[in-house]
Image (cartoon, grey):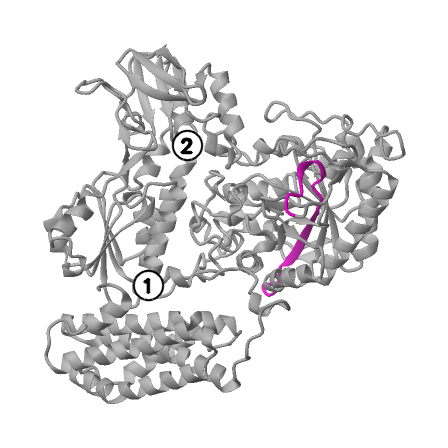
Amino acid sequence: MTRDPRYDILFQPMKIGPVITPNRFYQVPHCTGMGWQRPRTLAHMRGVKAEGGWGVVNTEYCSIHPSSDDTPNPCASLWNDSDIRAHRLMTDKVHAHGSLAGAELWYGGIRTANLTTREVGIDLGSYPNSAGHPFQTRAMDKTDIRMFRDWHRKAALRAKEAEFDVVYVYATHGYMISNFLSPTLNTRGDEYGGSLENRVRFVRELIEDTKEAVGDRCAVAVRFSADEEIGKDGTPIFGDRREMFEMLANTPDLWDINIADYSLEMGVSRYVKEAPLEPYMDWVKSVTDKPVVTVGRFTSPDTMASQIKRGVTDFIGAARPSIADPFLPNKIKNGQVDSIRECIGCNMCYAGDSLAAPIRCTQNPTMGEEWRKGWHPEKIEPKHADEKVLIVGSGPAGLEAARALGHRGYEVMLAEAGRELGGRVTRESALIGMSEYARVRNYRQQDMAEMANVDVFLESPLGVEDVMAVEADHVVVATGAKWNKTRFDWTTYRSVAPEGSDINIFTPDDIMDGTLPTKGPVLIYDEDSYYMGGVIAETLTKAGLDVIIATPADKVSAWTEQTSERWRIHTSLMKLGVGIELSHGLDSYDGATATLVCEYSGNSKKIRAASLVMVTQRTPNDALYQDLLASVDGNIDALPFSLGKIGDCDAPAVVAAATYAGHRYARELGAPYDVDQMRHDRVDVGETSDAPKVKKPSTRYLETLCKYYEEEVEGEAYFHAIAERLKDPENRRKMTVIAEVEAFAAQSVRPLIEKYGLSPRDHKDLLKSGRDEAARASASWADQIAEMTRSFPGYVDDFLALEQMAPPEDLPRLKLLTEHEVAAIAFLNRENAGLPASEKPMLTYLGRIS
């Protein structure tokens, strides 16, 4: 497909100081929840973005000194040579795709308490910690200013040595450097405070220092707020920002512009739509000759091109859109605009950093799994066998499983009991402010529409007999969950209505079905603490009802603090006149009066409530799964298909967990993932100077280990290919089990391959080699059994010899390699003897039976 010429402007190379970008797509610095602790995870994630066409890919905030430690939030760091080596992992990945890599040098000051390093933070004054920790900064004197400039300069030099192309001076977001610009905070009486010229001096010196240190090869960017203070959305309060910007206008090589209100800049889609920063940008480009970048949760190529053509910005800055779809630029470039995974503005990515965990994405379930699991947003392994998969339920988990399995090449049947696809996202997107959540459904529905191997059946409720009649090889239930009318008091689920009463209690399901209370006041009791309670409150208030929201938490929608939306939710409810009862649990409700109990004092109070909406917990809709199990007396292996359940049907959670569950099911079908072998992105003490000394393994051992690993991967592909050629279903099933045993054996020793830095042949090449060998082999079941009976016993001796060469700490994994051959030989003995269930030893090895 060819690119729409309207978007050609987005692909123009741009000069930033001494470097040139391949296009105008600019991944701005953004948090990842990975930081210095997970360098490989981080490097692979950033590398995929470069592969997807982002012309500039930046780090997150990168500490320049141990006295800027943001624990518990993970930040990057450039403190020493070890950090240089860690960052090279990222810059090499980014450069491999022709993109530029940028480092955002950062110092927290008032915002960081240095809980890990225990260093004393510095700022322009002795200020209380703005994150709420009981610490204050030390007021900087001129010696501290000189010392800080030296810290910053050394960090810039380290960034250059790490092969970064863009180096930042970070002068916004309330961190230390930005405080020097503040007309209220900066009351210093020396040349660094008071007048506008003095307040700008420190930033000017840092820009000049950085350009002097690295400007011969690196562009110097400045992150800067266009407005002075938070005002009404879309109505900037500029203060003297324009004047100070004019004083620095052409000093850096690039301006990265944001605003004072982070809840608008990072706003969730409930309250903030695309391109919200445009009113704040109207003067910026008129007073500088340097290129400018800004953000706006851009997902529409038309909006992007318009921003450039109208002179709002020179680059399309993005954090969240680059997370939702790392290949967004390439999709526009290649004329695949309809295949963009648009960001839904839920800020689940931001929650990862807030919780000190690697970022996750509702739309992109591969985000954060690029290194650990080898997942790629646009690539997936082909099917392992010619099989049919039945998915029951088309919510976010079912849709993602169907989409991903379709790309793998499986024959997929998606059965939906209702008239629409989407499950909870279709229902929730109809609530006030939630319309963009429908993108979760829309992207997957459109992607599947082009797949001939995916069939969708609406209005198709299925029972046990229906499922059996499909004759699928695999069945997965994804039928979601329903909201409870009860609450959980941390000992049991219990009703708040009198026993035996028929009081009508509403849940979010009722509201989404269009069944609203007819009279108020309506009490919404929120134990969910995410967005649903606030959404229901806004929905009912705008329907003309008086609403009170009560929660046992100390804050409304408490968990949304992780997604940077709690402030806006609380503000919205107050503006709507919603009554708010914090720190109170609901004890009872009689249809007219609710009794609330204080979480601290235990005191109770009664409030009038004509209606009650319970937003508490959910119960999985897993009846079909349980019925299928019951049909074989709970013996799951007796079913003629593999059976699973995913998403809310398995364990109710956020939408991002559902799309991840669906994707994981699709990825792991035919290639089970052993969670006990999950990769950890951490320092291996075996590689440090203070580690116990161990005998270095021999070259022969390492070469043999690599060779046997390659053979297991080839064997997996070989036996899958043979299975596809077998006509008898029973024999085909047994041969598939052999392939799974080979795959498990390979996975068992994969950590050793990584431990020693071995370089086996490319995985795809190994699979192809196995399939090619199968194409040359006999497809006769008897011939295959005879050949395996002849050759397999000798392999046991080979594996035992490998154990003899191995360091003791490697033996547990190598024994799994030996045991897989023992299990296969046991199968052959039973098969040759004509015993029933001959594959039992292999299933035992795989852990399916005991």
Q: Return the residue nearer the eye: 86 or 783.
A: 86
Q: Position of residue 20 (x, y in %)?
A: 70, 57
Q: Return the residue nearer the eye: 364 or 704.
A: 704
Mark 2: amino acid: Met
In this view, 478 is above or below 81: above
Residue at 78 percent across and 27 percent down: it is 183
Task: State which quadrant residue 768 falls in.
Answer: bottom left
Apparent side of residue 41 relative to residue 673 in the rendered image (left or right):
right
Instruction: Count the numbered circles shown.
Output: 2
Which mark is drawn over residue 271? none
Which mark is drawn over residue 672? 1
Residue at 23 percent across and 64 percent down: it is 387
Part of the protein shown in magenta: 96-116
Apparent side of residue 817 relative to residue 463 in the rendered image (left or right):
right
Quadrant for the N terminus in the image: bottom left
* Residue behind mark 2: 434
Q: Secondary structure at mark 2?
A: loop
Residue 122 belongs to the span the image colors magenta: no
Task: State which quadrant residue 580 falls in.
Answer: top left
